[in-house]
Structure formats: structure tokens, C-alpha cells
Amino acid sequence: MFGKLLNNFYYGKSGKGDYRRDDLPRNRWQLFWEMLRIRLSGLFRVNLMTALAFLPMMYVWVVMVNGLFSHLLEVSDALGAGAQSASELTAQSPQVIYGILFSGFVLLIPCVALTGPVQAGLAYVTRNWARDEHAFVWSDFKDAVKDNWKQALGVSAITGVMPLVMLVCYRFYGAMAESGGAFFLLPQILTLALGAVWMLALTFAYPMMVTYRMGFGTLLRNSFLLALGRLPQVAGVRLAMLLPALAAALVAFFTPYLLYAFMALCGYYLLIGNALARYAYAAFTNAVFDRFINARIPGAEINRGLAQAEEGEDAPEEAAGVR
């Protein structure tokens, strides 16, 4: 009986047809859901394997958000009770909120920088899975971290510094606008726009660094160009991956279950959240790379995992400059 089970595992069941090219997904949407169904358990494994690197960042976020809610609750209680100190608390509230955010963002810099190499490993594994290619959870992850840790650390360091820069610049130009006129509103808005575009460019940065051989400056430039060129699509993908966080925020704001909302959100990201987001970004960036980069590289294979990709028998596996 055991031997029969092994034969079925290796050779399939008798009378059952082979997996044909016509059975392959015909479009990106079908490929996304088919690979998600097949690789779901792998996403859990790779997320749990890398969760330790994200714990410091999650802890800082929890402490910072808890400090903000505690302060806002204190102000709300003082206003509701008509306390004499309510007006003083309200006047000092912007400075207190700025102090909480400033301290939290400073602590986030090393915590976010630590996640860069891990994100590169996740990007490589999920990129392969998203285009129906094999990847070992540990060995391929480790090799991708080893090959890309320098660029990944540079990207994550910029990501860690970005919230602090945005906060300081926004407050500085806001104060200048109050005293010097509305002219300073423009750099204030540009500061927020730069931070938003950087977050969108991150969607491409990690998948690009594990797919192509390019310098760090070229990596950043191409990531920004693709983010701006596909702005509505990449913004939609990022917002879709933020839905659990938005749902937790709504529960925290409009119900008394703040603690449970954050516990559920932390559990989601510890179990599968980050790997699932990386998989969605990989599926999206694979399509963008095929259209704007791979199509311009002689011999580069496109539409991997789709039925159309199997039609050319002589197409090479890799092209120069493509991993």
C-alpha cells in the first residue's frame, strides 16, 4: 500500500491525463490565483521564517500608536469633563504629538533598515512563485539575501529615514507658512508627495534588484520611473495590501476594541501578511517588467507561467543582465 502511494505521488494516477499547455493560465489574473492556491502554505512558512526581523519594527509602531491614542484620550477626557487644564492640554497637543512621532520615527530607522535584506530574499522567492517557477523556501531565500544585501540595506535605510524627514520638513515648512505666507505650502506638499512616491517605488525596488543586474542609482531611478509611469495601478496594489491595516484602524477609532484590533493586525502580519504582500507585488511587477523591460532585452523570456510563454520552443531561459 505504501509503495502504491509513493508511485501515485511520483508518477500520478493511472488513467489521469498529463498537465497540458492548454491547462496553463491564460492571463495574469488566473496565474495570480492559481499560484496563490498552490503556494499558500509556502507563504505561511516563509513569513514565519522571516517574522523575527520585523518584530522590532512592529513593536515600535505599537508603542507609538499607543502613545498617540493615550494622549488623545487624555485630551478627550479633559474636554468632556470641562477641566481647567483642558485648554492647556489642547494648546500643547500638537507639540506632544510631534514629540511622540519624532521619537518613534527615530527608533524606526534601525528597525526598518534591518528588514531590507529579508525583503530581498522574500522578493526573490515570491517572484519565482508568482511566475510559476520553483524556489526553495530556505536555500533560495538565503542566496538572494547574500547576493543583494548591500542594495537591500541601502533601500531599507532610505525607507527608515523617510518618515522622519517627512515629519521634520512638514513641521518646518508648516511653521514657515504660518509666519511667512502661503508660499511655503508648496514645499510642504512636495514633501508629502516625495514620501508617497517613494513608498510606491518600493513596490518595484526589491523585485528589480533580485531580477536584474544594475547599480544602486539605476535601481532607484528605474523604480521611480516605473512608479510614476504606472501610478494608478501601483497605488491600487499598495492600497489593496493596506486593507487589513485600514480595517484595524477603523475598528480602533470607532469601537472600544483598540487592543483586539492591533492584536489581530499583528497576528496577520506575523503569520502571512508580509509574504502575501510580497507575492502580490511580485505578480504585479512581473507583468510590468515584461512590458517595459524584458520586451526590450534581446532573448529575454516574457509571460512566464502563462500558456503563451510555452509556444516558442527555442526561447532561451535567461538573457544577459536578467537573473
Image (cartoon, helix red, strand yellow):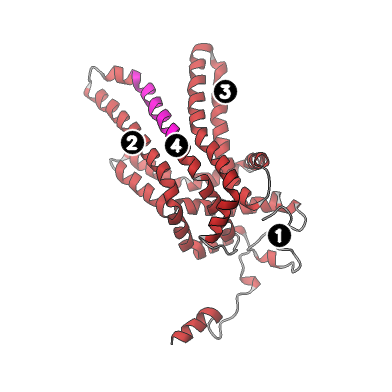
List the residue tagged with mark 4.
108
Q: What is the secondary structure assignment of the residue under circle 3?
A: helix
Q: Amino acid at mark 3?
A: Pro
List the residue tagged with mark 1.
318
Q: Quadrant of the C terminus?
A: bottom right
Q: Horizontally, is 201 left or right of 308 in the view?
A: left
The answer to which image quadrant residue 199 occupies is top right
The residue drawn where x is 39% and y is 26% is 99
- Categorize mark 4 by other alpha carbons within 10 Å: few (<14), some (14-19), many (20+): many
Marks 1 and 3 sit apart, C-alpha to C-alpha, by 44 Å
Whole-percent x, y for residue 287 in the image: 64, 53
List the residue tagged with mark 2.
66
The residue drawn where x is 43% and y is 51% is 51
Q: In this picture, which residue range is highlighted in magenta?
A: 91-107
The label shown at residue 216 is none
Q: Is residue 4 above or below residue 277?
A: below
Whole-percent x, y for residue 192 in the image: 53, 30
List the residue tagged with mark 3.
187
Is residue 111 shown in magenta? Answer: no
Q: Amino acid at mark 1?
A: Glu
The residue drawn where x is 38% and y is 44% is 248
- Categorize mark 2 by other alpha carbons within 10 Å: few (<14), some (14-19), many (20+): some
Mark 3 or 4: the one toward you:
4
Of mark 1 and mark 3, the one earlier in the sequence is 3
- Categorize mark 3 by other alpha carbons within 10 Å: few (<14), some (14-19), many (20+): some
